[in-house]
Image (cartoon, grey):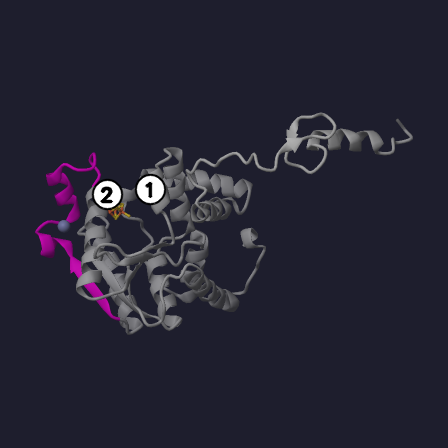
Amino acid sequence: MRQHRLALCKEHYLEWVPEQTERFIKKYNMFTRNEKILVAVSGGKDSLSLWGILVRLGYQADGFYIGLGIDEGINYSHESQRLTEKFANENNLRLHIVDIRREYGQPIPVMAERSHRGYGKPCAVCGLVKRHEMNRIARDLGYDVLATGHNLDDEAAVLFGNTLSWASDFLLRQSPVLPSSEGLARKVKPLCRFYEREMTAYAIARGIEYIYEECPFAEGSQSIYYKEVLNQLETARPGTKLIFYLRFLEARKSGELFIEKNVEHAHVHPCTKCGQLTSAPGMCSFCRMIEKVNTEPVDAAE
Ligand code: Q46
Ligand code: ZN
């Protein structure tokens, strides 16, 4: 892992990921061992790994799967549900399932078509339904926290998109923890600091059987494009994604984001040599640089 300057064998890697997860849970005050956690599981590597990690760490975590009714010739929903149920059974975990067609009469693609939302793609409707159902189930079944498997690549891509359009409302709401409000459960993302490939490695090393395919409607989406762009940056400079995200969290926390900072005039004074304003004590940086240049011993060869 170049970005962490760390290399681990399989056994240590399988310990390292849960240890780090526990560290992030504590650092961001996500939840305690007395709270009931509902993990939104999709059958993918991130959410299944997250569920397994939380249980391993001794948290009370149940799963929640939403049957979206997406087929598109690859049996996507059916297969992801099968793998989610298999994971729950093998690990003796409690899984709640909501089938959207059974609950509301139509699967997601039909709902999208009939409601004319989202320019030919069902994602807008799907997102709306998923958010609504997660909140509903968490509230009705008395869970304190809702956990999702978003990883660093997901978060960095969202951040990138929101930064490109300076969507300040969204930027101010993007966080590893969203406190509960007006009947909505607290939302947490315990994996938000793991690279996508770190989670893939974890799921494989742990032997988790997950759905490899992305939802067929994800193809060509903006978030996938942003992930590709960020991966190019990451290849050229390892650690870019992590720094991009972490520096954002710091700026957000410190309140620096979008608050016009008053230029600090308090401790500015004229430079003792040139008279231009400076915050450095005594001479300004320019004069100090010039002075240094002129007092450095000149190389004999010159
Ligand atoms: S929103 Fe769109 Fe996803 Fe729903 S329809 Fe598929 S791609 S699953 S994250
Ligand atoms: Zn409603």
Within-10-Å neighbours for mark 1: few <14, some 14–19, many 20+:
few
For ligand 1, tell me if the residue under mark 2 lies within 8 Å: yes
Image coords of residue 167 (percent x, y): 34, 36
Q: Is residue 193 visible?
A: yes
Q: What amino acid is found at the position of numbered circle 2 in the picture?
A: Cys
Q: Which mark, by number, is residue 92?
A: none
Which residue, given by chain and number where applicable, does mark 2 sit on?
123
Q: Is residue 72 visible?
A: no
Q: Identify the residue shown where x is 41% and y is 38%.
A: 258
For ligand 1, tell me if the residue under mark 1 lies within 8 Å: no
Image coords of residue 288 (percent x, y): 74, 33
Q: From the viewer's perspective, is residue 88 above or below residue 166?
A: below
Which residue, given by chain and number where applicable, does mark 1 sit on?
170
For marks 1 and 2 on the same chain, the one whose residue lies earlier in the sequence: 2
Disc 1 secondary structure class? helix
Q: From the viewer's perspective, is residue 184 above or below residue 235?
A: below
Q: Is residue 202 left or right of residue 5?
A: left
Image coords of residue 164 (percent x, y): 39, 34
Asked if residue 187 lies in the magenta stretch, the reply is no
Quadrant (top left/top right/bottom left/bottom right) for the C terminus: top right
Image coords of residue 239 (percent x, y): 53, 47
Q: Quadrant of residue 84?
A: bottom left
